[in-house]
Amino acid sequence: MDYLMKRSTLKEQDPDLGILAVQLSARVQREIFRRSAEHGFDDVRPRHGAVLAYLDAEGTRPGELARLAGRNKQTMGAILDELERLGYVRRTPDPADRRAKLIVPTDRGLRFMELSDGIVNLIEQKLSDTLGSDLYRDFRSALGRGVASLPATGHDTEG
């Protein structure tokens, strides 16, 4: 590292993987939530994506959502409480095991999920148009392999 140059300048000029990953995530989230707000979903927040990005229309168990989102059960519980208060999900008994709960999207939750999936598709199409379809496909593949090569467990990424 060139210690004559400020670290912030170095990171701005040649961002490392962590910075690029955060920037990509933040920009995708900003686009999703900006466009969603334009359609009446101004109460949903990026942290809610830990549920809404993985939720199945027929419902998903909270523990499975926590696993998929890389959140601990306590954090997931708090997010679910918020989404339930906002009217995006409801808790119902799991028909396969009445002791367990399923998190099921409400009509509002389903509309948001459909809208956000469409927005992500538009973002991906824009990236494919910018990079070219072959390079974008290779980028997605390499990114997926890279993510899979790193540990999925550890501290919760939610503050």
Image (spheres, grey):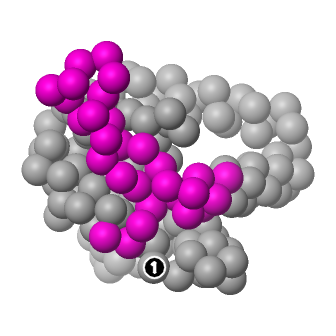
Q: Would you say residue 147 sits in the magenta stretch?
A: no
From the top left corner, tell me how far across and down residue 101 is, in percent.
24, 35
Q: Is residue 137 left or right of residue 61?
A: right
Q: Which quadrant does the C terminus fall into?
A: bottom left
From the top left corner, tell me how far across and down residue 108 is, in percent.
56, 63
Name which quarter of the figure residue 2 lies in.
bottom left
Residue at x 35%, y 77% (from the top left corner): 8
Residue at x 30%, y 47% (from the top left corner): 91
Name which quarter of the figure residue 142 lies in.
top right
Residue in front for this viewpoint, 61 or 9:
61
Residue in front for this viewpoint, 120 or 59:
59
Q: Is there any visible trace of residue 95 in the rendered image?
A: yes
From the top left corner, tell me how far across and down residue 56 is, in percent.
50, 36
Tag 1 secondary structure: loop
Q: What residue span does the magenta drawing correspond to?
A: 85-114
For label 1, the crowd category at 10 Å Cα-Cα, with few meaning under 14, some 14 to 19 and many 20 or more, is few
Q: Residue furthest top?
A: 96
Q: Would you say residue 98 sits in the magenta stretch?
A: yes
Name which quarter of the figure residue 27 lies in.
bottom right
Residue at x 38%, y 72% (from the top left corner): 86
Vertical side of 81 occupied by 66: above or below = above
Q: Is there any visible trace of residue 19 in the rendered image?
A: no
Residue underneath mark 1: 43
Residue at x 45%, y 72% (from the top left corner): 44
Residue in front for this viewpoint, 48 or 140:
48
Residue in front for this viewpoint, 56 or 16:
56
Callout 1 amino acid: Asp
From the top left corner, tell me how far across and down residue 51 is, in percent.
39, 49
Q: Which quadrant does the N terminus fall into?
A: bottom left
Vertical side of 107 occupied by 26: above or below = below
